[in-house]
């Protein structure tokens, strides 16, 4: 089925899926923390757009509430909190050098291909838009994991974790045409609690090793040797 | 009749180019709290320069004097390929988009040679930088354009625009990527702010100005005019490929008038965006330019891939 024959909702979902995938790649290659947080906020905004689009075209008004929650939490509150943390720690000028940046980017690309490969047999029978949206969201999940592995700052780990959640949320919106309200409120609350918990973790890591660079946690071993 | 309109369209392109540059400067001055020169100032500059006696170094070869004419005519020929107010003209049917990129490469080749010809340090430096940047920008531009041509299944620019126009509003992921890639490439190729600063002669980081530092009089006027033409060409390319609505498909005067109004409006809007971007963004270090252009290439590649993966029939 060609894209010209699909309806406007499908086209918009496909475009947003492509942009969300791009945002994950941008996060993977980012070496400055403030820009990483900004790209994360952009991804959240795209997610808000998806949700409100689904609410509009599927006539599902409770999705607007979910969109508003996404906007408040993932576009405004969490980026603001992370940004304040970074500025407070005075690490926004540090350029975090990634080891093997090329390998990481290539790894990300192959993860994307892998997720297409994995999902291809599952959705043979459904519409092609499902295949694409699910493959993009699976690859957003995998790229978020790669982001957590490859970066060393704890802030980057949090952003990776949250972007995994973004991928799952996108898949849920597209696949189920809107989850029940209870589930969505639960997820939003979980994200909020996670954000607060991460704030406390930052405080503890910082007070024990004076930095948010998690590689320094290995140092205790080396002293004993 | 067709040929007449094609020639008129080309002439319109060449005549309007300084006006676009003037409008861009006007917007930029207002954004930066400066008093803007008149919109017609670029025309006055061109007239003033062409009345002056050119000074040519006695070290210069014939290449130095012929290069401005070659550059200007190659850019003007490229302008005739791009549909401005009407699609389906004989000039755009005889040459496709790859020829247009070829014209750009031709003009750039002679500009770089002219920069090297005099033998000053600045000229050679500018030429080397220009070649470095263009060797990275050209693949990115071709990637973005191939995305369009694969969608329309023709490399003919007016055919592709007509295809996009007739299809109506279709949101394509690949076009979003191609649009961003083409904007990034256009900024790099026309020497606008994050890559090169067009409004200075006195920086070690200049690229375009370094090559033409030795030119004066009518030669300088021709080169300036050609670079204004190139800016307008990229603007028209972006406006007409991705937002083709308003362009005329027939030759009757009413449609042509609407087409002219539409393209003027689109270019004015695009210039405002460019002025805002130039005011907000600082110039990049030269060694960061390759990162910028490889990002443009990545976007072009993603556009092509998403055309194949997301949009192709299965």
Image (spheres, rainbow, N blue to C red):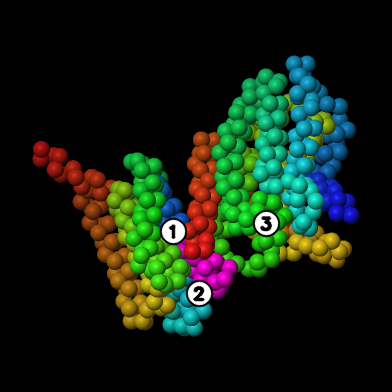
Q: Which labelled disc corresponds to residue A53? A: 2
Which chain does tag 1 point to? A
- Measuring from the top left, give residue B209's x and y in whole percent: 68, 33
Structural distance between the alpha carbons of marks 1 and 3 = 28 Å
In the picture provided, is B86 more to the left or to the right than B116?
A: right
Q: Earlier in the sequence, mark 1 or mark 2?
A: 1
Q: Is residue A4 magenta?
A: yes
Q: Nearer the viewer, residue A120 or A34?
A: A120
As drawn, A136 above or below B206: below
The residue pinned by badge 3 equals B160
Q: Secondary structure at mark 3?
A: helix
Decide if residue B249 is in sight here: yes
Question: Tag 2, which secondary structure?
Answer: helix
- The residue shown at (69%, 42%) is B99
Comparing marks 3 and 2, which lies closer to the viewer? 3
The local crowd at label 1, few if under 14, some if 14 to 19, many if 20 or more residues have their Cα within 10 Å, is many
Do the dots labelled 1 and 2 sit on one chain?
Answer: yes
- Give the chain letter at badge 3: B
CB under 8 Å between callouts 1 and 3?
no
How far apart in space, not on screen, are marks 3 and 2 (Cα)?
A: 30 Å
In the image, taking residue A92 as reference, residue B206 lies left or right, namely right
Gap between marks 1 and 2, in whole Å? 18 Å
Q: Mark 2 packing: few (<14 Cα in 10 Å), some, or many (20+)?
A: some
Query: Magenta part of the protein: which range?
Result: A1-20
Q: What residue sits right under mark 1 in the picture?
A: A21
Q: Nearer the viewer, mark 1 or mark 3?
A: 3
Percent across and percent down for residue A203 are: 26, 57
Residue B299 colored magenta? no
């Amino acid at each position: 089925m060609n894209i010209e024959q699909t309806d406007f909702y499908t086209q918009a979902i496909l475009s947003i899926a492509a942009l969300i995938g791009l945002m994950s790649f941008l996060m993977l290659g980012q070496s400055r923390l403030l820009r990483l947080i900004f790209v994360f906020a952009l991804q959240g905004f795209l997610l808000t757009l998806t949700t409100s689009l689904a609410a509009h075209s599927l006539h599902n008004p409770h999705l607007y509430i979910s969109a508003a929650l996404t906007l408040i939490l993932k576009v405004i509150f969490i980026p603001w909190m992370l940004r304040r943390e970074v500025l407070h720690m005075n690490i926004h000028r540090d350029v975090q050098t990634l080891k093997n940046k090329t390998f990481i980017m290539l790894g990300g690309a192959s993860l994307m291909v892998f997720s297409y490969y994995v999902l291809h047999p599952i959705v043979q029978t459904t519409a092609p838009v499902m295949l694409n949206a699910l493959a993009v969201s699976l690859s957003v999940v995998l790229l978020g994991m790669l982001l957590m592995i490859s970066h060393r700052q704890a802030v980057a780990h949090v952003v990776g974790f949250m972007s995994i959640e973004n991928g799952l949320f996108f898949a849920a919106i597209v696949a189920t045409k809107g989850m029940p309200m209870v589930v969505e409120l639960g997820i939003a609350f979980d994200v909020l609690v996670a954000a607060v918990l991460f704030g406390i973790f930052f405080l503890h890591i910082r007070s024990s090793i004076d930095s948010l660079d998690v590689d320094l946690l290995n140092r205790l071993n080396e002293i004993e040797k | 009749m067709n040929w007449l309109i094609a020639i008129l369209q080309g002439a319109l392109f060449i005549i309007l180019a300084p006006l676009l540059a003037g409008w861009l400067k006007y917007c930029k001055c207002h954004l930066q709290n400066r008093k803007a020169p008149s919109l017609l100032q670029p025309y006055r500059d061109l007239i003033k320069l062409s009345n002056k006696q050119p000074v040519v170094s006695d070290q210069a070869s014939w290449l130095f004097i012929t290069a401005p004419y070659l550059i200007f005519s190659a850019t003007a020929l490229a302008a005739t390929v791009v549909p401005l107010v009407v699609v389906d003209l004989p000039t755009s049917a005889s040459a496709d988009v790859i020829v247009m990129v070829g014209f750009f490469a031709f003009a750039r080749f002679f500009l770089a040679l002219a920069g090297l010809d005099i033998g000053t340090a600045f000229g050679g430096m500018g030429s080397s930088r220009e070649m470095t940047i263009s060797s990275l920008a050209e693949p990115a531009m071709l990637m973005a354009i191939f995305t369009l041509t694969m969608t329309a299944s023709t490399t003919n620019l007016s055919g592709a625009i007509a295809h996009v126009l007739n299809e109506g509003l279709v949101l394509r992921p690949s076009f979003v990527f191609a649009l961003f890639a083409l904007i990034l490439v256009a900024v790099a190729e026309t020497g606008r702010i994050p890559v090169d600063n067009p409004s200075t002669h006195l920086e070690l980081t200049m690229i375009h100005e370094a090559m033409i530092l030795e030119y004066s009089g009518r030669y300088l006027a021709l080169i300036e005019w050609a670079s204004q033409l190139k800016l307008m060409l990229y603007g028209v390319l972006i406006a007409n490929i991705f937002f083709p609505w308003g362009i005329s498909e027939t030759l009757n005067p009413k449609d042509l008038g609407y087409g002219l109004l539409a393209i003027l409006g689109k270019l004015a809007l695009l210039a405002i965006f460019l002025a805002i971007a130039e005011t907000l963004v600082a110039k990049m270090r030269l060694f960061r330019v390759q990162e910028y252009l490889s990002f443009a290439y990545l976007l072009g590649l993603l556009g092509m891939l998403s055309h194949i993966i997301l949009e192709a029939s299965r």
